[in-house]
């Protein structure tokens, strides 16, 4: 069961309206702080802790928007902010270093132009072959260092679109990861359309019918498996960018893509920001129609029959807050405050004016934007995740609890 189906039964016509929309909202790219200026003194040692793999760009020049190039540059700045040397990250972007002008952008006269990729430390083209070669080299090194794989580009359900319109499926990814050492943890962050379909990479062979992989894996995705995401634009004003990866890395590093400090995402106040906390930060910071989801959240939604969904959210919101983790409290409280909801009423009672106006009469109907609908969906998803987790832990199902704990531990990690 996918969240689109889940929320369709939960929220009625609203979910259908939101999730079947094929819109891709444009963001805008411009500021490029230097990557090569003074690196932190501890970069060399820090870079050995995690193997960073970045695969980015469109399948061809027409879909190779400048925003994707700028996403890589922001990732490099994020590495630098957190004390890592960007030179040690493996970067595969579009056509690589062949000198061809493939990056599409809109100039100051509103005309479409193409330029050569300009990314420091760019290694090769983002092809299937180069991806396989990188994983094979990693396998041969027999390294147990964790892998952080960032993909920023385009996708279709269960497939990444690489350069020359090559496809990498979730099954292909999982099968290749199955060949690596079981002691090599893998964390992915993906921002493409239908990104949530890659949550299945936690299973052997990438198939939910198979057992969970022996290797520790987890991931964070811009949106659910059935929806498009925002963020691919040929515009060059980076200050206007609003997308999941921008928010995720801002939360993780404490600095947004134009160099401004953001509020700390260290919600449990343990002195570091975990991936899971950065994910929570993005759920509030990202003012778009995306519905961010993680591997544990995707797994949780498969553990409850649809018939129990509405009943689950008939409980007062405060009941979920009382049993939530700090980052979950942040998400719930932020959205509740955003809409002025009553925590002592249920989700349905608070949202009836948006989703069921026929029950209130036309005069009480509350107009709502697609972005507001997305925030309400994020709230419903958050509450459901908490409720289902409680059911699993109360059930005493040791196998299910072990899987959940493993996913949460992985998602609670960080680069530090």
Image (cartoon, grey):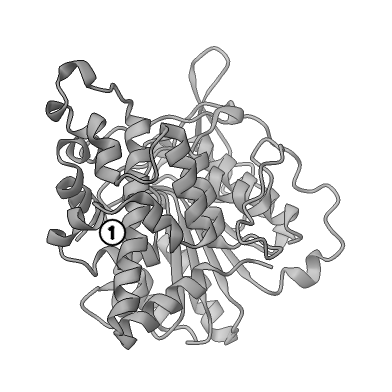
In terms of depth relative to the viewer, which is nearer, 297 or 169? Answer: 297
Where residue 31 appears, as percent x and y from the top left, is 67, 32
- Asked if residue 293 can be seen in this view, the reply is no
In the displayed structure, 54 sits above or below 36; it is below
Q: Is residue 21 left or right of residue 240?
A: left
Quarter-of-image position of residue 117: top right
Check disc 1: other Cα within 10 Å, few if <14, some if 14-19, many if 20+: many
Where residue 337 appears, as percent x and y from the top left, is 47, 37
In terms of depth relative to the viewer, which is nearer, 98 or 195? Answer: 195
Q: Residue furthest front?
A: 344
Where residue 39 appears, as percent x and y from the top left, is 83, 55
Counting every numbered tag in the picture gives: 1
Q: Quadrant of the N terminus?
A: bottom left
Where residue 95 appears, as percent x and y from the top left, is 50, 48
Say which residue appears at 59% left-offset and 40% top-offset. Answer: 70
Q: Is residue 252 left or right of residue 39?
A: left
Where does label 1 land, which residue? Answer: 158
- Asked if residue 246 can be seen in this view, the reply is yes
Q: Secondary structure at mark 1?
A: loop
Say which residue appears at 25% left-offset and 49% top-offset. Answer: 226
In terms of depth relative to the viewer, which is nearer, 51 or 127? Answer: 51
Say which residue appears at 46% left-offset and 32% top-offset. Answer: 233
Q: Is residue 117 left or right of residue 380?
A: right
Q: Quadrant of the C terminus?
A: bottom right
Q: Residue furthest top?
A: 109
Q: Is residue 77 left or right of residue 276?
A: right
């Amino acid at each position: 069961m996918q969240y689109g189906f889940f929320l369709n039964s939960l929220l009625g016509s609203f979910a259908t309206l939101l999730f079947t929309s094929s819109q891709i909202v444009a963001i805008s790219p411009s500021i490029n702080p230097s990557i090569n200026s003074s690196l932190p003194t501890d970069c060399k040692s820090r870079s050995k802790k995690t193997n960073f793999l970045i695969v980015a760009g469109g399948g061809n020049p027409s879909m190779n928007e400048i925003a994707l190039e700028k996403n890589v540059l922001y990732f490099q700045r994020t590495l630098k902010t957190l004390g890592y040397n960007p030179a040690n990250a493996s970067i595969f972007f579009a056509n690589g270093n062949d000198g061809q002008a493939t990056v599409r952008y809109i100039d100051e006269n509103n005309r479409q132009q193409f330029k050569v990729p300009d990314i420091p430390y760019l290694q090769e083209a983002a092809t299937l072959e180069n991806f396989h070669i990188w994983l094979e080299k990693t396998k041969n090194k027999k390294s147990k260092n964790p892998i952080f794989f960032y993909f920023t580009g385009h996708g279709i359900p269960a497939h990444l679109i690489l350069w020359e319109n090559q496809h990498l499926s979730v099954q292909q990814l999982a099968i290749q990861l199955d060949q690596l050492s079981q002691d090599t943890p893998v964390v992915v962050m993906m921002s493409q359309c239908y990104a949530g379909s890659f949550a299945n990479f936690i299973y052997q062979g990438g198939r939910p019918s198979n057992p969970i992989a022996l290797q520790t894996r987890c991931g964070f995705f811009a949106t659910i498996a059935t929806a498009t995401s925002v963020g691919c634009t040929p515009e060059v004003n980076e200050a206007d960018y609003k997308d999941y990866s921008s928010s995720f890395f801002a939360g993780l590093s404490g600095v947004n893509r134009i160099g401004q400090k953001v509020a700390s995402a260290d919600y449990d106040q343990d002195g570091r920001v975990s991936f899971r906390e950065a994910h929570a930060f993005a759920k509030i910071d990202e003012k778009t129609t995306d519905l961010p989801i993680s591997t544990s959240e995707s797994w949780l939604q498969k553990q409850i029959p649809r018939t129990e969904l509405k009943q689950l959210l008939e409980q007062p919101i405060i009941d979920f807050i009382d049993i939530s983790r700090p980052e979950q409290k942040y998400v719930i409280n932020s959205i509740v405050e955003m809409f002025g909801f009553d925590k002592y009423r249920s989700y349905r009672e608070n949202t009836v004016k948006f989703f069921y106006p026929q029950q209130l009469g036309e005069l009480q109907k509350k107009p709502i934007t697609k972005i507001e609908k997305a925030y309400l969906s994020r709230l419903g998803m958050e509450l459901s995740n908490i409720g289902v987790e409680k059911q699993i832990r109360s059930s005493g199902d040791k196998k299910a609890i072990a899987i959940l704990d493993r996913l949460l531990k992985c998602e609670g990690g960080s680069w530090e």
